[in-house]
Image (tube, rainbow, N blue to C red):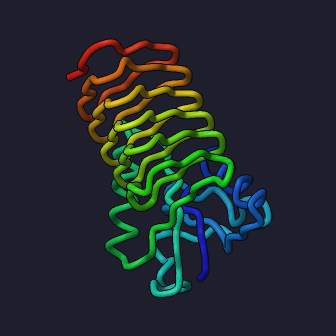
Amino acid sequence: MKRFIFGTTDLAENLLYNLKEDHQEIDGFVVEQKYKTGDSFGDYPIYCWESFAKVYPPGDCGIYICVGYTAMNSQRRRVFDEVKKAGYTILDYKSPRACIMTEEIGEGCLIFEQSYLGPYTRLGKGNVLYPMCVLAHHSTAGDFNYFSISASVAGKVEIGDECFFGNNCATKDKIKICSRVLIGAGAYVSSEVP
């Protein structure tokens, strides 16, 4: 299968680094025309999404969605939906250096090194967990959330869609965080967030 990374952001570069560490290769990068600033990213070609299917039609191609948290993750959701609708396989990344104790993980999630997903946790699709994130036992996260470095979610927390968790933030257990909530770096969330 040919494999590509959608995006040329820091997130994409970090994923590339991790894939290389895991002895996995990609075939190039894909961006929307308005974001294309050159013909290559490192040693890899960059293809325009608008004409990508002419070069690599869906079928034997997979794409990692590496769009960050722009507009509270709605850009990542939009790109994910477009790529899926076009017939491409959405790839996910689970670092072998992460501790993953659940199988309930939606497609297209990127889980980086030293992250921890406890027993009975559930992740929807398109979530990003940067290094050293914690989702403790029985917690659930909807779709297209972004967990920055060392974000810590206690047990039995229910998270909606398109939330952002800043560096080193933490939650109390057994609370609900609704959709499209931004939790800043270093914050402690002790009660429900509408």
**Is the N terminus in the top left, top right, bottom left or bottom right quadrant?**
bottom right
* Residue, far left: 194
Q: Quadrant of residue 167?
A: top right
**Is the C terminus in the top left, top right, bottom left or bottom right quadrant?**
top left
**In screen coordinates, is 40 left or right of 107?**
right
Where is residue 158 drawn, in percent x and y?
A: 28, 33
**In screen coordinates, is 102 left or right of 133?**
left
Q: Is residue 183 above or below residue 120?
A: above
Asked whether residue 52 is in view, the answer is yes
Q: Is residue 131 above or below residue 104?
A: above
Where is residue 106 drawn, in percent x and y?
A: 38, 58
Q: Residue at x 49, y 25 (%)?
A: 166
Could you say which is closer to the camera, residue 162 or residue 33?
A: 162
Count of marks overlaid on the render? 0
Q: Is residue 94 above or below residue 86?
A: above
**In screen coordinates, is 19 left or right of 54?**
right
Q: Residue at x 34, y 51 (%)?
A: 124
Where is residue 62 drawn, in percent x and y?
A: 52, 74
Q: Residue at x 36, y 47 (%)?
A: 122
* Residue, far front: 119
Q: Quadrant of residue 56?
A: bottom right
Where is residue 188 drawn, in percent x and y?
A: 42, 13
Q: Residue at x 41, y 32 (%)?
A: 164
Asked whether residue 31 is in view, the answer is no
